[in-house]
Amino acid sequence: MQRTIGTSAYGLRAPIIKSGDCLKDIVVESLDEAVKENSFKLREKDVLAITESLLARSQGNYASVDDITKDLNEKFDDEIAVVFPITSRNRFSVVLKAIANTKKKISIFLTYPQDEVGNRIIDTETLLKNKINTYKTTLTEEDYIKLVGGEYKHPFTGVDYIKFYKNFAINDNIKIYLTNDPLEVLKYSKSVLIANIHDRNYLKELYKEHGAEKIYGLDDILTSPVNGSGYNKDFGLYGSNMATENSIKLFPRNCQEFVEDLQKMIKDKFGVKIEVMVYGDGAFKDPVGKIWELADPVVSPGYTSGLVGTPNELKLKYIADTDLKDLSKDEALKAMKDKIAAKENSNKGQMNLGTTPRNLTDLLGSLADLISGSGDKGTPIVLIKGYFDNLATE
């Protein structure tokens, strides 16, 4: 009988996780309860995805403003040029509070009209009307205020981020500039703190090449504990989120060890080897606000070996309109199954008839992020079934 269900995803409810909890035990217990209550049958290549926030919380991976400030003071002298941070209360405001708390001269350089994940600080129409060349023109705070007529509020949050960031200044030690030229920064300071997420490595090399004297990224801050704080040796402050007004929760540590241990525990309990991953922000773009969701350094900081690579798929809708267009329904189904069965491994990772070769972890992490949400659903664990099935799977 032809299967009627393909891929399905379920948000699993879990208890409120506290620092010091054994998350692996809790995940296995939550999965066991879901399997019993819903009569799930776990299968090879099912995927269990756990949100990064859950793991970081169980690790107690937190740091205070004072912890961050101390690390910054050890790395910088009298001034800091903060390069291309995103405009976000949740992601950057506590970090900026710590930067301002150094009481050094702070110059913040924002890209415009939007940051790297799509948050706008000025309308494109305003720039066109005033004939502003965003590739060549650097705007001061005063220029910006004049252009927007006093203030510009983010369409989703209602926040004027220039004013919001400026309010973190101590003794007026923050100046804000808008530019899309990273080398413009060196006209103001030779000491740079790169806050850009996805071009961080390129920017480090660029500043080395052009004579910056101190070059750090957010991934160089809190790579080890400060006064017993949390830390992340791989990503530093990247991927951190506001925990309180004066503290952050960092991206989790030891993710690879966690997923591999959890995979073994599940195999021991259920007798099935499923894939396990830790996920953060999904890699998708909002069509209204034009915001690209990925403010974490990666979608998945840890995943088991079965999730390495990209999908090896045929473009069914293309084949249906070409090779199968003159066949009956039953003949077309059989022919399509035959084509799927005959796929060669050499096709894996190549764009095949319009199929976009995204990483499996980016696709699965995005699905998990949409299922779990970021509010009060209470489902930080996601079970994905049948993702690796296709039309020929019985």
Image: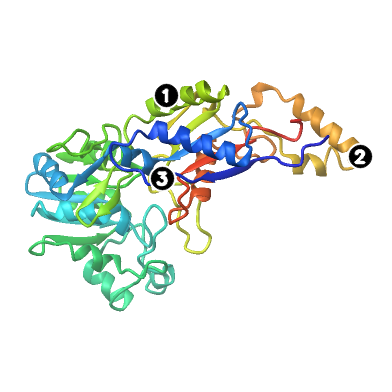
Amino acid type shown at disc 2: Leu
| Nearest the eye: 276 or 95 | 276
* Left or right side of 97 for 363: right
Q: Which residue is mark 1?
A: 261
Q: Which residue is mark 3?
A: 15
Measured from the top left, where is residue 70 in percent x and y? 10, 43
Is tag 2's residue or tag 3's residue first in the polypeptide sequence?
3
Determine if residue 210 is in view: no
Residue depth check, mark 2 versus mark 3: number of the one nearer the observer: 3
Measured from the top left, where is residue 119 in percent x and y? 39, 60
Measured from the top left, where is residue 48 in percent x and y? 52, 35
Q: Considering only vertical position in the picture, is 146 above or below 225?
A: below
Residue at the limit of the structure toward the bottom, as seen here: 149
SS of the residue at dot 2?
loop
Q: State the CA–CA distance, disc 2 to disc 3.
A: 53 Å
Quarter of the rendering containing residue 86? bottom left
Circles 2, 3 touching at the beta carbon (< 8 Å): no
Residue depth check, mark 3 versus mark 1: number of the one nearer the observer: 3
Circles 2, 1 touching at the beta carbon (< 8 Å): no
**Looking at the rendering, in which quadrant would you find the N terminus?**
top right
Is tag 2's residue or tag 1's residue first in the polypeptide sequence?
1
Q: State the CA–CA distance, disc 2 to disc 1.
A: 49 Å
Q: Which residue is mark 2?
A: 327
Amino acid type shown at disc 1: Asp
Quarter of the rendering containing residue 341? top right
SS of the residue at dot 3?
loop
SS of the residue at dot 1?
helix
Q: State the CA–CA distance, disc 3 to disc 1.
A: 20 Å
| Nearest the eye: 252 or 363 | 252
Determine if residue 44 is in view: yes
* Left or right side of 216 for 136: right
